[in-house]
Amino acid sequence: MSSSSSSKPELNGAESLVQTLIGNGLKVCFANPGTSEMHFVAALDRIPGLRCIPGMQENVVTGMADGYGRIARDPAVTLLHCGPGLANGLANLHNAKKARSPIVNIVGDQATYHAPFSPPLAMDTVKAAETVSHWVRTSSKAADVGRDGAEAVRAARTEPGQVATLILPSNASWDGGGTVAARLPVEGPAPIDTDTIRKAADILRTKSNVLILLGDNALRHEPQQQVARIQEKTNCRVMAESINGLHQRGAGRLPILRVPYPAPLAIDMLKDVEHFICAGSRKPTGFFAYPGVPSFHAPDNAGVTTISLPGQDAEEALRLLADELGAPAQAAIKGGPRPDMPKGIPNSEAFGQLLAAIMPEGAIIADESITFGGLFYQQSHTAPPHDWLMVTGGAIGYGPPCATGAAVAGAGRRVINPQADGSAMYTLQALWTQARERLPVTTVILSNRKYQILIGEYASVGANPGPTAMNMLDLGNPDLDWVKLANGMGVEAAKASTLEDCGALMQQSFRRDGPFLIELEI
């Protein structure tokens, strides 16, 4: 046999990228491809190793990658079609960036020699990507694609989790000369500053109104055990930031309340705080500006000491602080009885009790309940251990895609998506992916047929809505039929008007292999 016949065939750029991504440990590709990405799609077909999951709109694709990254703590790949396809996915990439989710975007583009002719899909893809990405690069030739792919994975894995976008002109995909790149080392986070730990300990010893504010990875189970030690020693207050990418909650975790979203409630709750000790968090800041309301919701004279930044080892920082204080080696976290399943007409508090009463252990809550969900959170302290995800960037339409991606990463864990009806219409195509992949997602559409949050915001900003404004916030005329919408995408569904009917349907869904949707009248 000649040496030429035994040599390996030359790789094109797309093949080198797929092999690089697999070699770097990536497992899932959420995709909505077009013409410019066909060589990448062909490479996925020939090279096993990446599970390919389609989404019927790009904001579903990027939202799925966000949910996957939050649960897996590792990036998924998205495959998007040129600049306009990326633009369709920007809202959920914005949420992902705020959640610090690791994502690798592969965005096709015009061939380098074709772009100067200004074809219809040509746009400044780099500028669009920069708005939601920590790292952006264009691979202009096949020989660079594998190397750039490995760099993108390294960027995505950089703490506290980053969005990396690799733009791939179509000729860089189809040309030969591709080279597979090895896995690159990821630089670890900055070490914890022990001088700051000693300062925080002195503050806890000498001040009476100290609040430990937790965010980012400080809201995982292990750091909370260290906070329990500190709290037992000092009796300090502990809260979570208002909006968090992932909060591990339920039995065995601290019963932590969040800083309220409404500015007046937050300002009142924090008015006596002398000093904030921040672990993965920052001084409480308003979601919006309102006339006559300060941007910071903490007192002006309140001090701030940050013991860990997002991405740093919050568990180590809190353990060092507990040790510096001479806290007990372990502290019991006091729980309470799990609530009984409530009955009657749904309200926010009762639906939160319903979730706590029936959710299975290890459940994932992808919460986009918006206004109706104001009291959900505090009702589930005694539920079984679970993960709670939130719409971190405020761009609505996060819930169904995030729930879908979380279910892929959860590998059998039940995902519950309490979902506002107006927000769900932004990304209802995620139901199709849930049905196609037979994912264990229970969606509860909270159907009030109006944009209730915006009605509340009118009052907050001091505006006076009239008939035209209120008509724009009305989701009736015609009413949305969520059972028919779900059925049309292959998801079984039913309506409920009472808590006991909703609870019974949810429990039935937990015994199913695939998705189920409940339209709950509220």
Image (cartoon, helix red, strand yellow):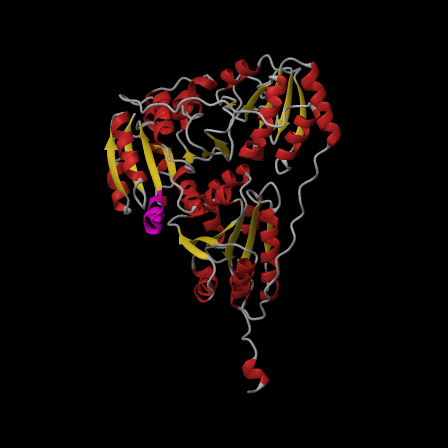
Which residue range is magenta in the image?
431-440
- Note whether 93 is above or below 461 in the view shown: below
Query: Which quadrant of the rendered structure holds the C terminus?
Result: top left
Q: Residue at x 64, y 37 (%)?
A: 312
Q: Residue at x 47, y 41 (%)?
A: 92
- Note whether 427 is above or below 201 in the view shown: below
Query: Which quadrant of the rendered structure holds the N terminus?
Result: bottom right
- Note whether 20 is above or below 321 in the view shown: below
Residue 291 at x, y = what percent? Answer: 52, 17
Which one is nearer the viewer's eye here, 414 or 184? 414
Dominant secondary structure (helix, strand or loop) of the stretch shown in magenta: helix
Inspect this view and state whether residue 171 appears: no
Residue 420 at x, y = what percent? Answer: 36, 31
Which one is nearer the viewer's eye here, 409 or 62? 409
Inspect this view and state whether residue 196 appears: yes
- Note whether 19 is above or below 74 in the view shown: below
Quadrant hosting residue 358: top left
Residue 283 at x, y = what percent? Answer: 61, 24
Which one is nearer the viewer's eye here, 67 or 420? 67
Residue 376 at x, y = what percent? Answer: 40, 25
Is residue 490 a member of the stretch shown in magenta?
no
Residue extending furthest bottom? 1
